[in-house]
Image (cartoon, rainbow, N blue to C red):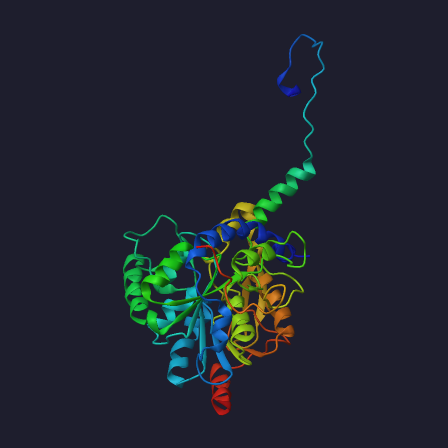
Amino acid sequence: MKEFLKGNYKLKTVIKEPVVSDTSSTDEFEKQALSRLGGSICFVSKKGFLWKGEDGKTDGPRETDR
Amino acid sequence: MDLGKRIASQLEAATFERIAGVGLENAAVNRPKIERSILELGDVALGDGDSAVVVGAGPSLHRRDSLARLRKSGYTGTVVAVDGALGSCLRAGVVPHLVVSVDPHRERIVRWFGDPAMTAAPADDYFRRQEMDPAQAQDEVAANRALIGLVNAHGPQMRAAVATSAAPAVVARCEAAGIAMYWWNPMYDDYDKPDSVSRRLHRTNGLPCLNGGGNVGTAAWVITHAVLGKRRIGLVGIDFGYPPGTPYERTQYYPELREMFGDRYAEAFIPVDSPFVGERWFTDPAYYWFRTVFLDMAREADAETVNCTEGGVLHGDSVPLLPLEDFLAKADRRE
């Protein structure tokens, strides 16, 4: 903001600029950009190939409320 | 670390950001359509013996004429194809026992099954740019019309392993073509965590969660050994890379890399030697990640996997290279 306020006068009020973290905005940009490069399905490390549920006995779709 | 490999190392988290939202939305829309779990496929006879060929849609499929050779061999084992390879399979006279679809993209993916709603070439240049099905890159309208006919003709002979994340248009298309659907959830995250998305999704529909390895080709391979119980698997068309000479602008993630890195986009590509054909292929960060994950997963699998693509970048201790005919002959002897 300060760069737009130039003149032959002095402000009595101190202008407080919002604090913008370069790190967080860069991180957010990277996160957004990277998400466009990802795959069509997730990969979850060290969790095996197939998870059938808590009891491991699921052998079909649960009754739905359709 | 090279730029491409550095990006690749971050894609596990990035993929969740990319697809979890729309995947879960699609799961809610698809829920009334769910009648069968993918686990039921374990009791269905799909092909002879304990071997299978998993068909991806990489450029080697056409370069090596893999499907015509598969058909000529008279192979009677199981054939599992990714959705992007379905058109190539049917045009080559190979009707897969199972076709796998997972990508949640709402508009694009139905094209792999023939999109009845398409009347003109779309503004989206995805199918003109992609390397997966050359037929779809030419006269898009005519290719789409022909594919609709092929899928309709063979639909009742096939089954589909459909992720709950799949686009509702794909589900409608499978229904219309008479393709029986067997459902599964993509594993989104660690199901042991208390706030796990995977666990929550499983609770809503009771379906198993499958670790997909980042892409539909790897998911198809996981289904083949972890669900169908196949113990010897040959891969064709699973390249995770591009042949030498492929223009960068005809690669999967070119627009995104160009946007991210401007004129430096080429630095994100990674060269990988393909020893079978003695060529230097190249890959992008996403495909490099798929490759790394696949090689790791193959070490843990209770199945022998060989790469019969005769090209591509997927090779290592856990996935040795083998000519397609050698795999098929070996499978024949054991059947």
Residue B316 appears in the figure: yes
Where B221 sits versus A62, above or below?
Answer: below
Q: Which of the two residues, B231 or B111, is positioned nearer the viewer here? A: B231
Q: Which of the two residues, B86 or B129, is positioned nearer the viewer here? A: B86
Name the residue at 64% across, 11% down: A7
Q: Position of residue B178 (x, y in %)?
A: 33, 67
Q: Which of the two residues, B272 or B45, is positioned nearer the viewer here? A: B45
- The answer to whether residue B226 is left or right of residue B157 is right
So how many labels did they put on this image? 0
Residue A9, quarter of picture = top right
Name the residue at 65% across, 51% down: B195
- The answer to whether residue B275 is left or right of residue B68 is right
Residue B128 appears in the figure: no
Q: Position of residue A26 (x, y in %)?
A: 65, 40
Quarter containing the N terminus of chain B: bottom right
Where B213 sits versus B277, above or below?
Answer: above
Q: Position of residue B156 (x, y in %)?
A: 33, 71
Outermost residue, bottom side: B333
Residue B148, quarter of picture = bottom left
Outermost residue, top side: A9
Q: Position of residue B85 (x, y in %)?
A: 41, 67
